[in-house]
Each structure stands twice: as C-alpha cells, then as structure tokens.
Image: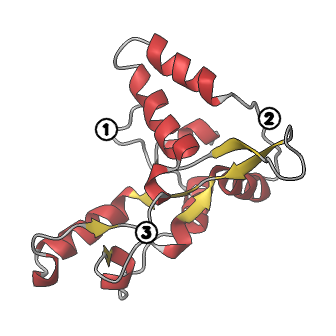
Amino acid sequence: MSLPTLSRHISWISYSIPIKHSNMFPSMEMEMPKRTVLNFEEDVAAYTIKASVDPRTCNRVIIYRPPGNIVSQLDLISSWEKKTGTTLQRTHISEQDIIKLSESLPFPENIPVAILHNIFIKGNQMSFELNANDLEASELYPEYKYTSVDKLLDICLVNPPKPKLAAFA
C-alpha cells in the first residue's frame, strides 16, 4: 500500500515548517516538525457514540488526542519505512508552493491541498494546550482500547481497509 492510499484511512494533522534562527546562525533555516493527531475513523465513531449518551459531555467539546496517535509527518513516514523495509522518496515543497497550489486548483480539487496545509504545515490540530476543563476522549473513556498509529500501520500492511466514501483522494 502506498502512502497516499494509507492516507485515506487516517484522519490526519501536522507537518514541518522552516523557521529562521536569529541567535547564532541568522541565515540558517531549520525544520521544526509539527505534531498532529491521526485517529482511526472507527475509533472516532466509537468515542462519539460513547459521548452521545454520557451526561458528562452534555454541551461540551470533546477533543480526540490519544497519546499513541500524536506524531509528526516525518515520524509517520519513518514508521512506514521501517515496517515495509523500503525507503520513500522525499520531495520537499515550500509552504508558498502549497498555498499557490491550493489557490490555483479548481474546486473541489483544492480542498485536500488546503486541508493538508492546515494540518501538516500549520499544525493547527496541536496548536493549543489542553487544560483541566477540556475533555479528551482517551482520558474520558480509558477502558476503550483505541487503535494507535503504529497498530493502524500494521493493519494497513496485513489487511488494508477499503477507502471510505467520504475520503477526498
């Protein structure tokens, strides 16, 4: 299974953006990986069903951030390479090029590019800290054994799930 095919089975989020260091090396750019949450669709559905009948969640927002599902894009690629024994070719595309692509593609082809920009380059899914009042699904329902990213990669290697109808690729 290729990485694009794999992406159909994971709810994504994150990437790495270049930042300029002004201290010792003002002209040096360094990649700082953004982390994201990748949740298996069936787990999101299970948590949602549990929350729908739980009085603790009434009029509350539930955040899906199981610890085993927080990774960077580079972590994900590295794990896939280790599991498959292959090395994927990496092509780095600047943020400006991603933005231009999302602006130039016709609707709805621009939607996946815009979403991937938001989650992999901007890292918006992990751009805020949870506080004591936030409800995180895996903490709220510790008895539910969610599918970690590592386990999902194993599933995709042995018996890949069919893409869902809502997949944009």
Q: Say which of marks 2 and 3 sits in front.
A: 3
Dot 3: element: loop
Residue 51 appears left or right of 17? left
Q: Closer to the N terminus: mark 1 or mark 3?
A: 3
Q: What x and y, as percent, mark residue 142?
A: 37, 87
Q: Closer to the N terminus: mark 1 or mark 2?
A: 2
Question: For residue 65, which numbered disc appears in the image?
Answer: 3
Q: CA distance from mark 1 to mark 2?
A: 28 Å
Q: Looking at the image, which residue is at 34% across and 75% down?
A: 136
> Circle 2 sits on which residue?
89
Question: For residue 166, which numbered disc appears in the image?
Answer: 1
Quarter of the picture holding the N terminus = top right
Dot 1: element: loop
Dot 2: element: loop
Residue 89 appears left or right of 143? right
**Amino acid at circle 3:** Arg
The one nearer the camera, 166 or 73, is: 73
The one nearer the camera, 125 or 154, is: 125
Quarter of the picture holding the C terminus = top left
The one nearer the camera, 120 or 168, is: 120
**Amino acid at circle 1:** Ala
Q: CA distance from mark 1 to mark 3?
A: 22 Å
**Amino acid at circle 2:** Gln
Q: What x and y, as percent, mark residue 92?
A: 74, 32
Question: For residue 10, which numbered disc appears in the image?
Answer: none
Q: Say which of marks 1 and 3 sits in front.
A: 3
